[in-house]
Amino acid sequence: MKVPVLSYGAGTFGGGNEFFRAWGTTGVEEASRLIDICLDAGVNLIDTADVYSNGLSEEITGKAIAGKRQRLLLSTKATFRFGEGPNNVGSSRYHLIEQLEGSLRRLGTDYVDIYHMHGFDASTPVEETLYTLDGFVRSGKVRYIAASNFSGWHLMKSLAVSERYGWARYVGHQVYYSLAGRDYEWELMPLALDQKVGALVWSPLAWGRLTGKIRRGQPLPEVSRLHKTAENGPQPPQEYLYKVVDAIDEVAKETGKSVPQIALNWLLQRPTVSTLIMGARNEEQLRQNLDAAGWKLTGEQVARLDAASKVARPYPYWHQAQFTERTPLPVAEG
Ligand SMILES: NC(=O)c1ccc[n+]([C@@H]2O[C@H](COP(=O)([O-])OP(=O)(O)OC[C@H]3O[C@@H](n4cnc5c(N)ncnc54)[C@H](OP(=O)(O)O)[C@@H]3O)[C@@H](O)[C@H]2O)c1
């Protein structure tokens, strides 16, 4: 299945609690309009999750796509806690069946195109999770399965189990990756290359930081989800973030593109990246981000951005970087 290079994240739909209200409060009418804008631009993949605003994001997505389902690919997720009680969490057969049925109902559809395990559940046997997911695929309720936020060994063990039993395998990995957070490159990118698992990149603007509104000596704008959410996502060190933004600013001036467009275009050129899940709380942000595709930063500009965002590798990656003759790095370090 082909996915568009840019897709749209519905985390901003609903605003059902304080955390998600800071992301956005997009309702059905606005969501429907934003999705139409996406469709006009060829962006036909919408990503949501059961836990986004406690199901409200899925509900709004479902209403907003009424009559458009066949033109769209829908991605959602399960695993994280969805309510009280010992069984309302995880990737057990019990919880996944409950959650898939709930997601289908809220989305108003009878199938999900990409079903993600939102995180790894170390308390449920991997066999139980994958057997259940294989059943979903065979029933037609799920088209493809994907992981999210897995460690290398979580994903590799899961792929090995799928292969051992001939079950559906994870074809995608929804990962955090941005110009201000390149940890994905150390373990997960080489794994994705080797195992042919496509990356669906979440928070490509570093959790709403590479927006042009955050730079040295400038206070956070009044409207920014970071006032309420900064501690819940990736937290690049301040000085490092400023250094990366300085480099993006320089390239933005040269190209006439905006900071988010540069940050997104850099990601589009990275190996294994299948799609960037854009966040946009309104039409203006969305239209700007849609223009991040269809052109290319030069190799020299990419190299400068690589250099500005380079960080020291943890072990064993610094050691492996000394033996690239047989273990080549997937991308230049800068
Ligand atoms: N699998 C996971 O664990 C996981 C985790 C997080 C997200 N996701 C998915 O990834 C999607 C995107 O995540 P994200 O929202 O964190 O992405 P992001 O691209 O890092 O941040 C988007 C935010 O940046 C600001 N922004 C975006 N475009 C802008 C522009 N052109 N100009 C100025 N500001 C702009 C907006 O926030 P402000 O208006 O507040 O500045 C917007 O909400 C989510 O909706 C969800 O589907 C998945």
Image (tube, rainbow, N blue to C red):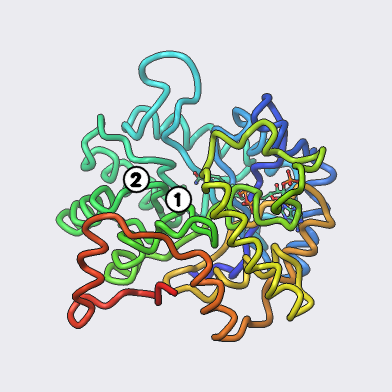
Residue 56 sits in quarter: top right
The residues tagged by marks 1 and 2 sit, at their Cα atoms, a distance apart of: 8 Å
* Residue at numbered disc 2: 133
Specify whether 173 is left or right of 66. left
- Picture residue at 54% right of the left edge, 51% below the top: 75
Check the image and report above or below for 222 versus 145.
above
Classify residue 132 by image quadrant.
Answer: top left
Is the residue marked 2 within 8 Å of ligand 1, measured from its CB?
Answer: no
SS class, disc 1? strand
Residue type highlighted by circle 1: Val
Q: Which mark is residue 142?
A: 1
Q: In front: 328, or 108?
A: 328
Q: Are marks 1 and 2 in contact (CB under 8 Å)?
A: yes
**Percent position of residue 233, x then y:** 53, 40
Quarter of the image where one finds residue 300: bottom right
Q: Nearer the viewer, residue 186 or 48?
A: 186
Observer able to see residue 166: yes
139 left or right, relative to 163: right
Rendering coords of residue 141 (x, y %): 46, 47
